[in-house]
Image (cartoon, rainbow, N blue to C red):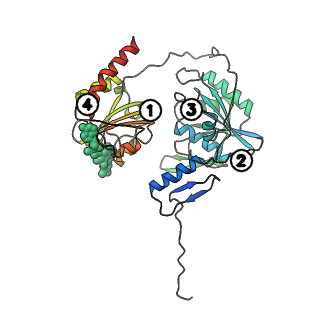
Amino acid sequence: MEGHQIMARRVNPRRPYVVTPQGRKRIILGAQDGLRDVLQSQHAAARKPVRSTQPFERHMLVLVHADRGMLDEHANQAIAAAALLADSATGVAVAVLGGVSGSPDELGASGADAVIDLPQLDVASFGPERVLAVAQQLIERYQPVHIFLPDRGADGDLGRRLAARIGCGIATDVVELDAAVACRVVPGGRFARCALPRIVLLARNAADASLPFLGRGVVEQMPLPDAAAQPGVRDLGLETSAPDQIGLEEADFILSGGNGMRDMDIFGALASALGAATGASRVAVDDGRFPRAKQIGATGKTVQASAYIAIGISGAVQHLQGIKDCRHVIAVNLDDSAPIAKRANLTLVEDAQALMRALLPKVKAARAAAGA
Ligand SMILES: Cc1cc2nc3c(=O)[nH]c(=O)nc-3n(C[C@H](O)[C@H](O)[C@H](O)COP(=O)(O)OP(=O)(O)OC[C@H]3O[C@@H](n4cnc5c(N)ncnc54)[C@H](O)[C@@H]3O)c2cc1C
């Protein structure tokens, strides 16, 4: 055998994989994306196992704000982090501030064992003291080992206030974690590690929200403290900003134009009738129809709107990169095989100019009726 080398065939662990109903990762050799999608949808249809059927001795608590009854990817990642770290004797209790619409099955799919639905604690009403009182009530009820929140906006604020109120350790902007250690990036691109504290605020994408198991998804009730008990806080209400006064990254509704969108006047009129911020593809920017600050994509802005309407945009990979976090994408395109149609939740195969002309009076009429 001297002089012979045995060449072992190695499998790249980052190759496409599916999670089997038993919760195992199966790497698909030679699979193309299309095949992977088919396999994934077959496995999604097969029921995953419930993470634990034992009685729970302790809990992890997750506090998340919902947006109009829905949990976004970042919120689901915080729930997934708790579920992945929980052992079989540890339950995952999820308090949804602002309330969530969804069946127990859907809630269980996020990894939640118990869901405490709190529709009264909506982000639209500013009540930090009331929310803190509820969080403390939840801590008393579940005695959580760790408390997880997404590190953003109202959730990040709540986590920091809670740490100060109950006097416990907190790690913010956590990018990596295991049962013992939390890790964050510090200036200079280095990692700083600490023992996993009681409160953990997670950066986006710190955990993978697609779990190989289910939580129990049991909805539990909890009485709320009096709404009036808000010492030192005065709620002045929400103020709506004009779409062009906020950054595209923060816009919730974007009307975006590409090479197939030629009528700038009607595009502008439609955006203002809809109350949408405007964005553009790189070709439309390079053409001089939009300023560079409006470019969305790999070399432009990354947006996370609830609704993104792409008019005459093909959906090149560089553009899709910029809209990966948008919730609903609507495409208007003459070509039903354009890549944007794969990403869009709804594609209208129509001439951009004709569609905008038809839509504008309807939007104006709907606005007038709503105002009246
Ligand atoms: C390094 C690099 C970085 C890049 N970064 C970005 C980036 O950040 N953002 C970005 O957007 N692009 C970026 N690009 C460019 C990208 O590859 C595409 O060229 C660009 O996104 C295409 O823009 P478009 O879809 O508007 O135009 P086109 O590709 O010309 O597509 C126009 C679309 O409009 C449709 N259409 C035509 N006429 C009509 C009509 N009358 N009614 C309805 N639909 C119609 C067509 O069917 C077509 O799908 C980058 C490219 C490179 C190489």
Instruction: Look at the image and tell me in which quarter the N terminus lies.
Output: bottom right
Figure quadrant, ligand 1: top left
Q: Choose mark 1 or mark 4, whichever is in front.
A: 4
Q: Which residue is mark 2?
A: 87
Camera-side residue of 19 and 58: 19
| Residue 284 visible at all | no
Residue 306's disc is: 1
Q: Which residue is mark 4?
A: 354
N-terminal label among 3 and 1:
3
Look at label 3 and name its amino acid.
Asp
Say what secondary structure mark 1 lies in.
loop
Badge nearest the viewer, 3 or 4:
4
Q: Amino acid at mark 4?
A: Ala
Q: Does mark 4 have its CB less than 8 Å from ligand 1?
A: yes
Image coordinates of residue 129 in percent, x first then y, are 62, 22
* Residue 209 point in image, percent of width and height: 56, 44
| Earlier sequence position, callout 3 versus callout 2 | 2
Residue occupying image coordinates x 57% and y 42%: 77
Measured along the vertical axis of the image, is residue 300 above or below residue 136? Answer: below
The mark nearer the N terminus, 1 or 4, is: 1
Label 4 Cα crowd, 10 Å radius (few <14 / some 14-19 / many 20+): few
- Quadrant of the image occupied by residue 57: top right
Q: Nearer the viewer, mark 3 or mark 2?
A: 2
